[in-house]
Image (cartoon, helix red, strand yellow):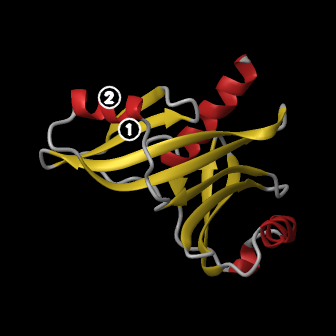
Amino acid sequence: MRKNIVLLLLVFLLFYGNSYSQTTDLLDENDVPLTVQAWFYKRYNNPAKIEWRIKKFSDKKYFAVSFAHKGRSVSALYDSNGTILEESTVNIKPVLSSEIKYYINQNYDKFKTMSLKSIKVFSKLSPKPTIYYQLVGRANQDDVSVWFDSANQIRRKKDFSGYASVN
């Protein structure tokens, strides 16, 4: 359990933490290891608008890719062996539970949904990925993110006002 939490925190820091990760300019696909490319193309059939980047954390390189797949905007994070660590899909149709709606109504005045992102965190310890959701919206001129899990439990709330997300 503790290893899962540490892995989850590491992945979130890699993907979202501007102060913890460093993103370089776009990579040419020829600069991405063949093992990473092979696993990417095996998982996604006919991706479009592919953009590769390197993310560095604790002197390790990770390969982030953004692309279009089946009409959705998708991003994924791979280690140098081609193991997928995280996958996120943007603009999935928001169908919110009553618990999440209640939380939003209690905490945010005039909340307007902008997008819902599904985030799958992969672990070697479990055959199934852990799925989290990031609901992005605006409340009183502020950008707001509400994080919850597949059991509709609020997991993390982060206000993105003042800086842009790494994505």
Name the foreground residue: 86 vs 31. Answer: 86
Q: Residue at x 73, y 81 (%)?
A: 46
Q: In this view, does 167 lie above or below 25?
A: above
The residue under label 2 is 103
Per the model, the C-alpha gap separating discs 1 and 2 is: 9 Å
Which quadrant of the figure contains the N terminus?
Answer: top right
Q: Using residue 30 as the reference point, say whether residue 28 is left or right of it.
A: left
Q: Is residue 123 visible?
A: no
Q: Which residue is drawn at 56% across and 40% down?
A: 132
Q: Where is residue 62 in the image (x, y as percent from the top left)?
A: 69, 54
Q: Is residue 4 visible?
A: yes
Which amino acid is tagged 2? Tyr
Q: Where is residue 11 in the image (x, y as percent from the top left)?
A: 62, 40
Q: Which residue is drawn at 71% across and 79% down?
A: 29
Q: Using residue 55 as the reference point, say whether residue 16 is left or right of it.
A: left
- Determine which quarter of the picture holds residue 58: top right
Q: In this view, does 156 lie above or below 131?
A: above
Q: Which residue is drawn at 82% across and 33% down?
A: 126
Name the foreground residue: 144 vs 110. Answer: 110
The residue under label 1 is 146
Q: Do the residues labelled 1 and 2 touch (CB within 8 Å)?
A: yes
- Determine which quarter of the picture holds residue 150: top right
Q: Position of residue 104 (x, y in %)?
A: 29, 34
Q: What element carries label 1?
A: strand
Which amino acid is tagged 1? Val
